[in-house]
Image (spheres, rainbow, N blue to C red):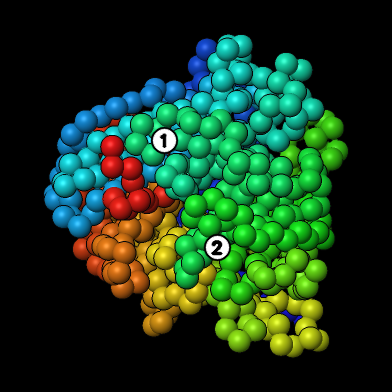
Amino acid sequence: MHNVTDNLPDKNRRSFMGGTLTAAAGISAVTLLGTTACSDAQPPAVSSVPAASGPVAAATGGLSLAAGSAPPGPLLFRAEMDVRYCEIEGTIPADLNGAFYRVGPDPQFPLRAGNIPFDGEGHVSMFRIKDGRVDYRTRFIRNERWMAQDKAGKLLFPMYRNPALDDPSVAGISRSTGNTHIINHQNMLLTLKEDSPPSALNLLTLETIVPNFTFDGQLTSKTFTAHPKIDSNTGNMVAFGYEATGFGSDDVIAFEMTPQGKKVWEAKVKVPYVGMLHDFAVTKNYIVLFVIPLAKDDEQLARGGIHWSWDGSRPTHFGAFRRDGDGSDIRWFNGPTRSATHVMGAFDDAGKIFVDVEMSESNPFPFMPFKDGSAWNPITGTSYITRLSVDLNNRSISDYAMERLSPWTGALPRQDDRYNTMPYRYGFLGTRDINASDPRQANAGYVRFDHATSTQMFWNAGAGTSLAECCFAPKSASAAEGEGYLMGVATRQNEGGRADLVILDAQRLDEGPLATVRLPLRAIGQIHGWWVPEAQLPTV
Ligand SMILES: [Fe+2]
């Protein structure tokens, strides 16, 4: 019997607009629609994108939603930029020094019909913040794919994770776009795409140093997650790869690297079926994989389509295994059909494991096809922060439990990353105002979850603004949990999509930004962002 408490048939249904289209990996539907509408003089629109007059528009009130940083307009940006001495409203906090990195897809060439925006080439941006000054820099990742396409002057990898359609000239080179996430490691910036190894960039210049980074050959998995975690106690990076032994394989390899890049642990497990393992959870003692029905679709691949489709006939599976074992101890717990692609925080306590995720009843991505041909549903596609738990002490249970933590909706949750693997109090989420009188016009904002008091604090970004994923920066390495700043890129729809970086006191979100860094034009679309404090940056 599932312990299901997330089925709230009437509760806050009207709030489904809040973050609905922040689709779990972070591209707003309107961003996608912009791709279709504005790729003028370019080949055809993305055919899988829902029409603007459909549920997407209904859910958004015609506005771009929380996670997208691009306005209604072309997905393609392609300008690499340097802006020195950015204009600043307010004051950059004196103890905020470091760099805020973002990455998102920016196709070199217009996407082929049927492709999805997750396939655009990775374009990294950096807000370098030091002594009250902010400089902005963006660079494409010069990975193997980008270099090959740049040389050829055309698309060579025309379909998201479908290598059968690749141009024969690129056989054997990395398909990575690196467009999903970034993390600093060994004094480099690793750019991540879960179907491939990372690339490594210079943290300050954003030049690509190593196009295909395999940790000096230690990476046995053919892939590397977009969501590695930093162990809260050791500082080690814990990561995994799925489809780890080859395209479509059901093998997962998990591993742990010291900050100096030495692999100190590895385990291998199999999943019940090959679904999108976009994120995972790491606690002090356990690894958790969560298998969702966004499943590899061989028939669709054979038709020349993308890797995944939503198979609503499949259940979910929560797999837990020890971090000090070889993976043979894995226990799988079952649950109903759901999506959950990002973790806010996770911890274990005396054999019990708790994992907080964004969870929706069905496919959260408007542009991901349904295996049975269903249309995307903005209500069942809405995500709520939900706590999943299992008690490993109980050998008789076969299902995981789940509990919805609040009525706030949205995807791309974050936490104070110093608490990646341990009990935590605060989480953050891009959302929309669930108290708006007209949900179709609800403003975007950031919300802070306080799990100790089960309360939430909301900052309303105001009308006409959409927000990208937020990122937390502590005041100092020793600051208390949640003591620091929350930042993210705000897109001003009524200014042609011009973008600002907003910086808020994470403990006083409702008071609004301490500083707003004004860019002269719009920002590149973002999936995820990452903060690197001054002490972890190169000195030159
Ligand atoms: Fe992600």
Q: What amino acid does circle 2 point to? A: Val
Give the percent coordinates (x, y) of residue 5. Answer: 62, 78
Q: Quadrant of the N terminus?
A: bottom right
Residue 403, quarter of picture: bottom right
Residue 500, quarter of picture: top left
Discs 2/1, front: 1
- Label 2 sits on residue: 343
Residue 298, quarter of picture: top right
Mark before the other along the chain sequence, 2 or 1: 1
Number of marks: 2
- Label 1 sits on residue: 202
Q: Is residue 160 visible?
A: yes
Few, some or many C-alpha atoms within 10 Å of disc 1 (few <14, some 14-19, many ≥20)? some
Q: What residue appears at the point 53 percent right and 32 percent down from the top-left corner?
A: 210
Q: What amino acid does circle 1 point to? A: Asn
Q: Is residue 489 visible?
A: no
Q: Quadrant of the C terminus?
A: top left
Give the percent coordinates (x, y) of residue 192. Answer: 55, 42
Alpha carbon separation for disc pair 2 and 1: 28 Å
Numbered disc 2: secondary structure:
strand
Q: Is mark 2 within 8 Å of ligand 1?
A: no
- Closer-to-camera residue (79/212): 212
Compared to 56, does 454 lie above or below?
below
